[in-house]
Image: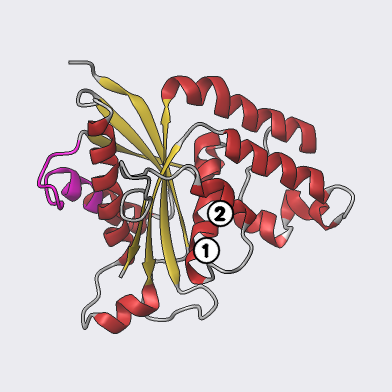
Amino acid sequence: MPEFSDYIVFADESGDHGLATLDPNYPMFVLALCLFTKEEYAAITAPAVMRLKFKHFGHDQVILHEHEIRKTLGHFRFLTDANRRPAFYTDLNAGVEEAPFTLVAAAIHKERHRARYSSPNNPYHIALGFGLERLYQHLDGLGCREGITHMVFEKRGEKEDAELELEFRRACDGHNAVRRRFPFEIVMADKKCNSAGLQVADLVARPIGRHILAPEQPNRAYDVLARKFRRSPGGSAQGWGLKVFP
């Protein structure tokens, strides 16, 4: 049995998992899981992210962060320049579109979740369970039944990281909807590690949440992502690549 699988997963979230207070403009928690083959990630995605950075910043030490891009903060202050902004967004969207990954996402509508349950569970834990189950089923369908698949998450804080790892291992030990042991291993990475995969995952999560909240609004980023969702044999992403709860 090989020690490692041919795949790697990068994960990131949008919104916070707290339920005590809700942001009325974004009452969502979205966990996005981007599945790459290691060969394509190393040959295509990582070099493409580096080339984008060299082109627009002159070096590769910038961390592509959706919040800072959207708010034109830090390295992204240049996006207030109408002459430079279109080219950057064109290249960024093209980079995500051309990145060869399969997308599995779980979105928790926190307002509905809190209203439906008297003791609502942690949205992060719910989303993680949905995501792990679908990734396992997808990899099983691809014939990937041997070797460990590593899943890379960004560190958020000592307490949060410990809680995430505990829930991750609980789900992988068989506490999941399919009652199987998942051959996954968690890797906690610092934001400053400059992982191309984590940066792609960071760009993915919020557009999904925005689309769920306002599907009628134009959302170019989501239009790109919609083609990457894991899908049923009939072509549906709902419940397969995108789980919305409740």
Alpha carbon separation for disc pair 1 and 2: 7 Å
Do residues under tags 1 and 2 come within 8 Å of each other at their CB atoms?
yes
Q: Which residue: 63% across, 43% down?
A: 63
Query: Closer to the N terminus: mark 1 or mark 2?
Result: 1
Residue 205, image x and y in percent?
49, 54
Q: Would residue 6 be visible to someone looking at this image?
A: yes
Give the overall secondary structure of the magenta segment: loop
Q: Residue at the location (74% across, 48% down)? A: 75
**Magenta stretch in the rendered image:** 167-182
Q: Is residue 191 left or right of residue 172?
A: right
- Element type at mark 1: helix
State the SS at label 2.
Answer: helix
Q: Is residue 22 above or below residue 221?
A: below
Give the quadrant of the N terminus: top left
Residue located at (19% from left, 38% from top): 182
Q: Residues within 10 Å of mark 2 (few under 14, many from 20)?
A: many
Q: Nearer the viewer, residue 156 or 119?
A: 119
The mark tally for this picture is 2
**Residue in view at x 63 percent, y 36 percent:** 95
The residue under label 1 is 211
Decide if residue 239 is on the left or right side of residue 226: left
Q: Label 1: few (<14), some or many (≥20) within 10 Å?
A: some
Question: Label 1 amino acid?
Answer: His
- Residue 103 lies, in percent from the top left, at 42, 43
What residue sits right under mark 2 in the picture?
Answer: 222
Q: Position of residue 70 (x, y in %)?
A: 68, 59
Label placed on residue 180: none
Magenta highlight on residue 191: no
Residue furthest to the right in view is 83
- Reply above or below: 232 against 29: above
Give the left or right position of residue 165, taking residue 91 as reference: left
